[in-house]
Image (spheres, rainbow, N blue to C red):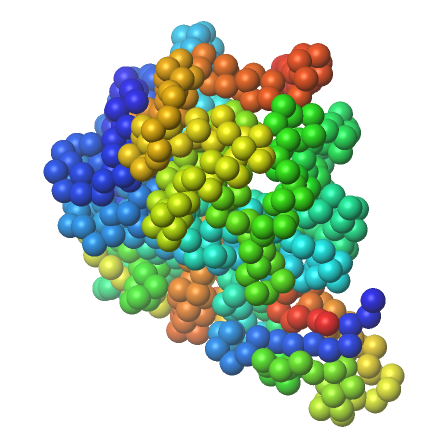
Amino acid sequence: MSDAAHLLCRLLAVPETALTLDTGRWGEVITVARAELLIGSLAYRLRGLPLPARVEAILAAAVRSAEEGRRQALWEAEMARRALAPLGCPVILLKGTAFVAAGLDAGQGRHIGDLDILVPRVALDAAETALLAAGWEWVKPDPYDDSYYRRWMHELPPLIHRERDRMIDVHHTILPPTARLTPDTAQLFAAAAPLGNGLSILSPEDMVIHAAIHLFADGDLSGGLRNLWDIDRLVREFTGLDADFLARLAARADLHQAAQVVSRALRAAHLLFDTPVEEGRAERLFDTAARRRLLARDGWGRGTRPATRFAFYVRSHWLRMPPAMLARHLWIKARSRGRRESA
Amino acid sequence: MAATRYRAPAQGGLRIAALDDLVAIYHRASGITHLAVAPVPELMEAMAGEWRTLDALADAFGLAADERGALIERLEELVATGLVEAA
Amino acid sequence: MRHVFSVRIGPASFRVGSDWRAPVDQLRALYAGYPAPEGGIADYTVRLSATRPWRRFVRPSVAIAGDYMLPDAAPLPLAHGLLAAEMAMNLQLALGERRFLLLHAATVERDGRAIVLTGESGAGKSTLAALLSARGWRLMGDEFALLDPETGLLHAFPRLVSLKNAAIDVVRAALPDARFGPLMAGTPKGDIRHLVPGEAALAAMDQLARPVRLVFPRYGFTPDARPVGAGEAFVRLTQASTNYVALGEQGFDALTRFVRAVPAIAIDYPDAASAIAAIEAEA
């Protein structure tokens, strides 16, 4: 059942694949693309190619959605800028919003959910106060989750704007302090590129490193295919602008203690999207498991391979906190989920 | 800290449709549709694309001293919705 | 997915995958005569699946899923599988449609001119539309009016008409030759039965209509009618649209043009007969 998911990867990497695609396969490709939140990206990649009428109509709708999504994402960034401007601290846009704000290829058709920003740790309390005063409020968390967030996580507990109903995640580093990797946050700020309106984005190398960290070390790989596509787009665009980009990326990854994570991400991108990367040592077992996890979606949009998915969920938490804490955290989560389900 | 000047989107930043007693305003930058009654549309026009001080706005509308409070309230509401910027 | 059903209803097509045969058989029977998706490619995908593998057989419970989903949507018992399928299809259109501005309304048409009946659940839209269809009006839809932003015209979306409780018998009496789906008793919204749109509705499914009246019916009040201004109509319609915001500036244009061009009236009515009379007086 990875067929449909794999086909989606082929279409993204080599759009001309669409020209010889069997009509019967479009249904499942569209379904997988929607489930992976990649339909907008697919629509941009296939623009201009002759496609069956219904496919063109569906992709045209996806382009419209992506355009509105882009507008809303940039507006959230603007409203955050207005609220935080009096603080005078650097505010770095992350992920999808950064891509569209900077006009990068990775932003074309990209689905954008929450606004993610990075501020210095010393500014965190002031940022929280300013956002609350400007109409954001806490998404009511579990009391345990709240203290977990504040002490251990790399971000404030999530905030949502009461009128616009959009979430903002305020980070102070790009991986939790308890994690096994510790990126050099001061360097992230030092190398950040200003957008000219008071907001900044990460440097190209740091942007790719963040994407790689987010893909493998931060999340449980659900939504991974979209993040991997980001990496493909970023790497191609940056190597197009600078022939030495990959070498600089490797050096920067060492600085952030993220060399392994970045290598794994680049290998996965190469495997699924033919991203041009440097030859390096492969990790057979890991690479195979990662590929299975990334393609675990069938032609009806269902997540498949539950065992692999759970393995990555546990693994991702293992990376974020020490094992003893992990056991306690997972046990409490399982208990509260059990309580909710039987209610 | 209190704001001293305000700015609304410039010409072309808004779409405005008069609907009998209401005015529907589509704010292009945000994609949000606002519904307003007088004097909001007039107020927006007085600040369109230009920073205006509170005094300038009060004068433009010939407001007495005791009416400034109401003006400030309207402006703050507009700032909260994002239609108007304050500095 | 073991069992699959595909159908085109107006400009929107669906493929429905199900872990059980019954809902698919019911859909196939009720939508007999409707065309298949154009080019074999459906706009939207719906999944009716068992909440847990063993719940396919033990107290079978249908979880609704698809391209677009609501978190925490409660599953339905298999006996109401047809209802689950209809709800799921509505949800796909509601959340996914970008070609047309969707208004939560029933629409009937005569001579190319359409009356749009909008209001909350319980206002009687579906019932009134069904009763009007017994009086020579073409049923264009009972749940969504599809407004084309380019032309200002309405497209038909004649899905199965959802009738509740007392309305079921009222409509059966008015349309003795019509086809109805099974009675689903004890759903969260009471007893539900679906009316299959008739031959006329199906034959004219792809014919557009110009909206000429917007009606806000209100059931259970002494008869009254009053004009509704464009401002009030605009506000009420944005609240009744699932995709106004998603359409952005195009949605703003489409809706402002609509409320300025189409006179609106609020009609209070104590019974169907008086509502029908008041609506036909508007035509």
Q: Quadrant of the N terminus of chain A?
A: top left
Number of dots carrying numbers: 0
Q: Nearer the viewer, residue C88 or C223?
A: C88
Position of residue A78 measured from the top left corner of the image (x, y, whole percent):
60, 60
Tell me which corner region of the image, top left, top right, bottom left or bottom right, holds residue C81. Answer: top left
Residue at x 78% of width, y 77% of height: B4
Q: Is residue C265 left or right of residue C106?
A: right
Tell me which corner region of the image, top left, top right, bottom left or bottom right, holds residue C278. Answer: bottom left
Q: Is residue A124 left or right of residue C278?
A: right
Residue at x 32% of width, y 37% of height: A275
Q: Nearer the viewer, residue C244 or B3?
A: B3
Q: Nearer the viewer, residue B35 or A166?
A: A166
Tell me which corner region of the image, top left, top right, bottom left or bottom right, holds residue A36. Answer: top left
Position of residue C233 measured from the top left corner of the image (x, y, whole percent):
51, 65
Q: Is residue A253 visible?
A: yes
Q: Quadrant of the C terminus of chain A?
A: top right
Q: Is residue C75 left or right of residue A197?
A: left
Q: Residue furthest right?
A: B66
Residue at x 76% of width, y 49% of height: A123
Position of residue C130 measured from the top left corner of the image (x, y, whole percent):
35, 46
Q: Is residue A145 left or right of residue A242?
A: right
